[in-house]
Image (cartoon, grey):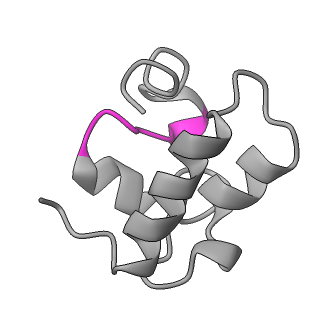
Amino acid sequence: MEERCVPCHGGTAGLYLDSYEGALAGGNLGPAILPGNPAESLLVKLQRNGHPNSLSPRELEWVEKWIEAGAPEK
């Protein structure tokens, strides 16, 4: 996420993906990540709907598994 997301979302639209706390807090559209619920997480929804500079399918699968596991910090 650091390479693909942070250049644009280091504060754009109030969304800070440059820290764990920022990713959980979300931005102007609400929480980006809902731990345990990848299907309802805005981050996943936007990636699946053709967000510019989208994650690769493999990267998105990793993010979904991480969110499903509760989005642990480490």
Number of numbered discs overlaid on the protein picture: 0
**Residue 10 percent location from the top left of the image:** 42, 25
Membership of 15 in magenta stretch: yes
**Residue 35 shows up from this direction:** no
Membership of 51 in magenta stretch: no
Where is 72 relative to 70, above or below? above
Provide the residue span drawn in magenta: 13-19
Drawn side of residue 8 relative to residue 62, left or right: right
Q: What quarter of the picture does the C terminus occupy? A: bottom left
In the picture as drawn, the residue positioned furthest to the front comes out as: 58
Q: In percent of the image, x 40 and y 38: which residue is there? A: 16
In which quarter of the view is residue 25 placed?
A: bottom left
Q: Nearer the viewer, residue 67 or 32?
A: 67
Q: In percent of the image, x 50 and y 76: which residue is there? A: 34
**Residue 64 percent location from the top left of the image:** 53, 64
Q: In percent of the image, x 42 and y 33: which residue is there? A: 1
**Residue 62 percent location from the top left of the image:** 46, 54
**Residue 45 percent location from the top left of the image:** 75, 59
Q: Nearer the viewer, residue 14 or 41?
A: 41
Q: Nearer the viewer, residue 11 or 40?
A: 40
**Residue 51 shows up from this direction:** yes
In which quarter of the view is residue 38 placed?
A: bottom right
Where is 7 relative to 30, above or below? above
In the picture as drawn, the residue positioned furthest to the bottom comes out as: 36
